[in-house]
Image (spheres, rainbow, N blue to C red):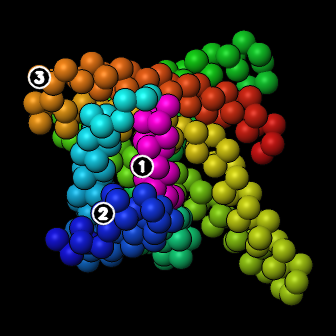
Amino acid sequence: MVLESLLNPLKAEKKPWEMFFLGYVYSSIAILLSLWIFKDQASLVMVFLTVMACVPIVYNTMKLEESKDLTIPKEMALLKEHSKAIIFLMFLFLGMTLSFVTWYVFLPSDTLNLVFDKQTSTIQSINNQVSGNAYQQFSTFTRIFLNNIKVLAFATLFAFIYGAGAIFILTWNASVIGTAIGNVLRSGIANLSSALGLSGLFGYFEVISYSLLKYALHGIPEILGYFVGGLAGGIISVAIIKKHYKDEKFSHIIFDVSELLVISIAFLLVAAFLEVYITPILF
């Protein structure tokens, strides 16, 4: 596979920023191919094609992290090693997200509706307004947190069943987040289209910053939670495939996976709090 040969987990951990460009290229190629071959179903096909490109690097990452469980006895050192994988996977996710944002902003309107049709429908269905009432805010916080836990469960389950299955959930989220950011950015640029000169330039920078920060504030810890949970599911999946459950160190793997799941839930708790109580104040 051509795309698979571009990078491996060991190289990615040394230069995690390279994954950003891979994520951008993977998703851009997927969008072009889906428009060319499956135009009417482009909004879903582009996700599947991006996932196909990412599966080798993600699955090899799961195998590498599982092998660390057998060789690194100290949990803090092990978590530090896992963090390297999480960082380069986050760069992969950010590259995909920025790619979806770029295509959303620059595609013609008729093509735009085809490429991001399912993502737009998803955003419309989950776009709940946060009320100023404290009780309703807590109710919204609980609903968002439980929904995030459900997504985490799917990411972990997909990783457990398919090894690298969590990348599907995360790629879909990248396409939805990219659509949401792109929509805000496209609308803002349209409002500033008549502005010229230096003031117009500052206006464009303001729109871009606003669009990114609005979703990055709670989106980054949320996606980190999904990646950590997906890593946990992938590690246990690889351990079972390799029959390491017969190894005396399997209990250490179970403890490591449990710790990763607790960390992922903590990330989602922080993300839900930021989304309900902080983001509406700032934006």
Amino acid type of the residue tagged 2 in the rendering: Asn
Dot 3: what SS?
Answer: helix
In the image, 177 versus 80, the foreground residue is: 80
Residue 153: where, in percent of width, then height? 35, 27
Dot 1: what SS?
Answer: helix
N-terminal of the pair, mark 1 or mark 3, is 1
Q: Where does label 1 land, which residue?
A: 85
In the image, 128 versus 49, the foreground residue is: 49
Q: Where does label 3 land, which residue?
A: 246
Q: Is residue 150 above or below residue 189?
A: above
Name the quarter where the N terminus is drawn: bottom left
Q: CA distance from mark 1 to mark 2?
A: 11 Å
| Residue count near mark 3 (Cα–Cα under 10 Å), binned few <14, some 14–19, many ≥20 | few
Residue 62: where, in percent of width, then height? 28, 44
| Residue count near mark 1 (Cα–Cα under 10 Å), binned few <14, some 14–19, many ≥20 | many
What residue is at 30 percent from the left and 37 percent from the top? Answer: 71
Toward the bottom, the furthest residue is 197
Amino acid type of the residue tagged 3 in the rendering: Lys
Q: Is residue 222 above or below residue 253?
A: below
Q: Where does label 2 land, which residue?
A: 8
Which numbered disc covers residue 265?
none
- Which residues, given as a range, are shown in magenta? 76-96
